[in-house]
Image: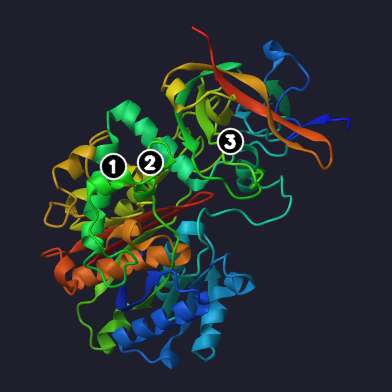
């Protein structure tokens, strides 16, 4: 089978780059400079924006600091994709503060990164990851992961 | 605007003439059956004939299938259509509070003298989940698809953050469960009516680190109803000194929301706009206090949405019962327990009830009403005069109700 990589949501992160080039993608309002992630392409949601601007795509900071983290010890319901025949492996969820954009972005931690590997305030970086593979359509669904930056 | 002669607050008081509930649990029946039982109990408590009700407001469930979208008419039909005005309200966990807001607005506008408000749900087992299908334009669908982030995952993020910033511990969180279970054991409408020990909390399985099963509320079936009326109607009805709703807060968050306090994929950015002066939860309480002209120091008791034990500690701060980071101290010192200075969740809270989403905010007001009437039995807060019920609805629906006597 020929496997094909597809982003779980188009336009939320760069595709095909190596680790060094991987970035989350948001949008920025040219009128008020508000930043949106997930990307906001229709309306600027800043009520104080004078309007008339455009929402242009911007890469977000590659690195941020852990705001908090948790994990999922029980299998989440659909639309999360998991095989009920395979024993559940908890995922780790990280909320990351990006200083330049002044916002907090959630994401799963990279494979192998557990609760014990994280601390609030720790520096992490966005890296490409695989969310799940669909053998039926030969699709590898790609996503972003947060990974601690080696000290 | 000056306060009206019949009460304080921005628009005047409305009377709570009757309360009714169906016990919480997993009963395996339709939400309509629960809602009608609660409605009949509230009408009987008020001494009001259903045919004299001028309007009915239903708090919607989206988990009961199609009828849930038209809850007001569904309850009205089951009680026997009698031509009342009808509304249905969906605002997630704030549905009950917003149903009260709709009823109150009709009463204060003179559109109806007496209004029946009903909320009921038959909840699924386990995690709440979004509706089915491929819906990538729905941020709630996306947080499950992309992150696998259940509601308890967000409770876990808040709990871990509080541990890191305020030095709270899982043992502090367990104290909340122990306190609420002790109160719930005294409440015949609660699903769980057994005291719980800290050791039992610590022995329960981790759901979303650092929170365990007994730190997180269950999903339940249940129902609650209120009969609300104008003060003039209450007097004509022979009730001179009813419990009164003085304020209902239904505010949205203020942009930019910089704390991940709703289940979203990211917060708003504070670039290009100053951060909001207070968090979403704080603003819900603040709006209710301002509308009522009453401050936190005047509260006799509070009912708060303890979706998790750690979240209850956060509410103490958001309600202004203590300063930031002091929530754990309040529960350690017994301030929020029965017999304390400001008892919180004397009903037993969600810890003892579980979530029956559209009913829970109404159940909170049922509890406050009983407390302010002095008829709460073994759970009675002596001399209770002022109570607040707060919750936070998914997607940014505020819900706060302040009642006085």
User: Could you tell me which secondary element the residue under label 1 belongs to?
Assistant: helix
Q: Quadrant of the N terminus of chain B?
A: bottom left
Q: Could one spot residue B110 in this view of the protein? A: no
Name the residue beneath numbered marker 1: B173
Label 1 Cα neighbours within 10 Å, binned few <14 / some 14-19 / many ≥20: many
From mark 2 to mark 3, how far is it between C-alphas?
35 Å
From mark 1 to mark 3, how far is it between C-alphas?
36 Å
Q: Nearer the viewer, residue B4 or B129?
A: B129
Disc 1 vs disc 3: Cβ atoms closer than 8 Å?
no
Is residue B191 found left or right of B394 in the rendered image?
Answer: left
Please tell me in which quadrant of the rendered image residue B300 appears. Answer: bottom left
Q: Residue at x 65, y 46 (%)?
A: A85
Q: Residue at x 52, y 53 (%)?
A: B127
* Location of residue B146 in the rendering, given as x and y in whole percent from the top left corner: 64, 38
Q: Nearer the viewer, residue A32 or A112?
A: A112
Name the residue beneath numbered marker 2: B211
- Residue under disc 1 on the same chain as residue under disc 2: yes
Please tell me in which quadrant of the rendered image residue A58 appears. Answer: top right
From mark 1 to mark 2, how far is it between C-alphas?
8 Å
* Location of residue B270 in the rendering, given as x and y in whole percent from the top left corner: 51, 27
Q: Residue at x 23, y 84 (%)?
A: B239
Disc 1 vs disc 2: Cβ atoms closer than 8 Å?
yes
| Chain under disc 3 | A
| Chain under disc 2 | B
Q: Quadrant of the C terminus of chain B?
A: bottom left
B348 relative to A44, above or below: below
User: Could you tell me which secondary element the residue under label 3 belongs to?
Assistant: loop
Name the residue beneath numbered marker 3: A46
A62 relative to B73, above or below: above
């Amino acid at each position: 089978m020929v496997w094909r990589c597809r982003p779980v949501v188009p336009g939320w992160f760069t595709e095909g780059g190596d680790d060094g080039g991987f970035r989350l993608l948001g949008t920025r309002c040219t009128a008020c400079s508000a930043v949106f992630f997930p990307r906001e392409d229709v309306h600027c949601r800043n009520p104080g924006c004078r309007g008339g601007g455009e929402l242009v795509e911007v890469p977000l900071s590659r690195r941020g600091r852990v705001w908090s983290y948790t994990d999922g010890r029980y299998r989440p319901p659909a639309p999360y994709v998991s095989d009920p025949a395979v024993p559940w492996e908890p995922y780790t969820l990280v909320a990351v503060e990006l200083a330049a954009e002044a916002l907090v972005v959630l994401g799963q931690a990279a494979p192998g990164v557990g609760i014990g590997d994280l601390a609030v305030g720790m520096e992490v970086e966005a890296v490409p990851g695989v969310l799940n593979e669909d053998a039926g359509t030969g699709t590898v669904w790609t996503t972003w992961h947060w990974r601690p930056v080696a000290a | 605007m000056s306060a009206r002669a019949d009460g304080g607050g921005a628009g005047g008081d409305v009377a709570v003439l009757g309360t009714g509930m169906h016990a919480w649990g997993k009963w395996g029946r339709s939400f309509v059956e629960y809602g009608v039982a609660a409605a009949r109990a509230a009408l009987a408590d008020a001494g009001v004939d259903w045919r004299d009700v001028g309007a009915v407001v239903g708090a919607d469930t989206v988990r009961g299938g199609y009828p849930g979208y038209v809850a007001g008419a569904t309850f009205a039909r089951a009680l026997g259509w009698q031509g009342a005005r009808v509304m249905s309200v969906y605002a997630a966990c704030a549905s009950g509070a917003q149903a009260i807001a709709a009823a109150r607005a009709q009463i204060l506008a003179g559109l109806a003298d007496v209004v029946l408000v009903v909320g009921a749900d038959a909840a699924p087992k386990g995690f709440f989940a979004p509706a089915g299908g491929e819906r990538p334009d729905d941020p709630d669908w996306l947080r499950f698809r992309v992150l696998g982030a259940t509601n308890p995952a967000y409770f876990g993020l808040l709990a871990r953050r509080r541990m890191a910033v305020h030095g709270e511990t899982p043992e502090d969180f367990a104290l909340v469960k122990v306190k609420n279970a002790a109160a719930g054991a005294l409440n015949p409408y609660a699903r769980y009516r057994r005291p719980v020990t800290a050791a039992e909390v610590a022995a329960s399985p981790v759901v979303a680190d650092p929170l365990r099963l007994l730190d997180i509320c269950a999903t339940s079936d249940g129902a609650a109803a209120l009969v609300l009326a104008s003060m003039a109607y209450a007097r004509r009805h022979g009730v001179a000194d009813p419990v009164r709703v003085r304020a209902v807060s239904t505010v949205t968050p203020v942009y930019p929301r910089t704390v991940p306090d709703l289940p979203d994929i990211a917060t708003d950015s504070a670039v290009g706009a100053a951060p909001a002066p207070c968090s979403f939860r704080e603003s819900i309480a603040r709006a209710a206090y301002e509308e009522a002209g009453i401050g936190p120091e005047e509260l006799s008791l509070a009912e708060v949405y303890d979706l998790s034990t750690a979240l209850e500690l956060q509410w103490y701060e958001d309600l202004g019962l203590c300063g930031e980071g002091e929530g754990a101290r309040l529960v350690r010192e017994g301030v929020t327990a029965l017999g304390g200075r400001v008892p919180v969740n004397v009903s037993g809270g969600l810890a003892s009830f579980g979530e029956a989403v559209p009913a829970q905010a109404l159940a909170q007001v049922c509890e406050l009403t009983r407390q302010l009437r002095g008829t709460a039995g073994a759970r009675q807060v002596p001399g209770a005069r002022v109570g607040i019920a707060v919750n936070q609805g998914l997607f940014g629906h505020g819900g706060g109700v302040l009642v006085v006597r």
